[in-house]
Image (cartoon, rainbow, N blue to C red):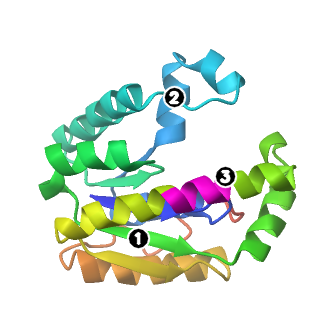
Amino acid sequence: MIILFGLAGSGKGTQGKALSEIFGWRWLSVGDVIRQTGEFKDIIDRGELIPDEAVIKLMGKQIEKAEAEGFNVILDGYPRDKEQAEWLMEHMPEKVDGAIILEVPKDELFERLALRGRDDDKEHESIERRFAIFEQNIYSILPLLEAKNIPIERVNGVGLVEEVTARLVEVIKKIIPEATEQTSDVNGGEIEHSYGE
């Protein structure tokens, strides 16, 4: 299992999808999983975060389901904070092969988010708050992974989508030497060429 971290606009959603296609793995985006349940629409509409307990239960089930079906997993947006990371390290540390942080300068992230045009990407102060929360959380999560000797790699997320994908593929092969590509198309077929989360 690979954990993919990145600020909003870093492209982790786009890259997570691409990598899942390339390696034949299951991409588990916490945002997608939550939306598909339909249970938390009111909370999402209010712009509030889903309680950790609910997210942990939901993602734990999805991870177990994917593995029962024979898939390795790419986690996108999970764990989001220290509590979620503590649960993962307590219950599934042996399943986590490594973590990758997609690094993109904030100036470029603002440009990408402006182009994306989502309502929650329009206010500069709102974006800054999201960045600050992510940075605070990542600094509390990484020591938990390091304590379990889980490799943490940082990857330059600047460049064409395909170039970033190629870098990620090489890092994953470094973390999981037995990982094999299922396709030579690093675009992942239907994978979009724009930057998402």
Q: Nearer the viewer, mark 3 or mark 1?
A: 3
Spatial CA distance of label 2 from label 1 is 24 Å
Q: Is residue 93 above or below residue 88?
A: below
Marks 3/1: CA–CA distance? 19 Å
Which contiguous range is marked in magenta? 130-136
Query: Foreground: 20 or 61?
Result: 61
Q: Which residue is mark 1?
A: 100
Tell me which corner region of the image, top left, top right, bottom left or bottom right, holds residue 174.
Answer: bottom left
Element type where label 1 sits in the image: strand
Q: Which residue is mark 2?
A: 50
Which amino acid, by three-letter code, is at mark 3? Arg
Q: Could you tell me what secondary structure mostly forms the magenta stretch? A: helix
> Which residue was labeled with disc 3?
130
Disc 3 crowd rating (10 Å Cα; few below 14, some 14-19, many 20+) is some
Q: Earlier in the sequence, mark 2 or mark 1?
A: 2
Q: Residue at x 30, y 66 (%)?
A: 143
42 and 135: which is toward the camera: 135
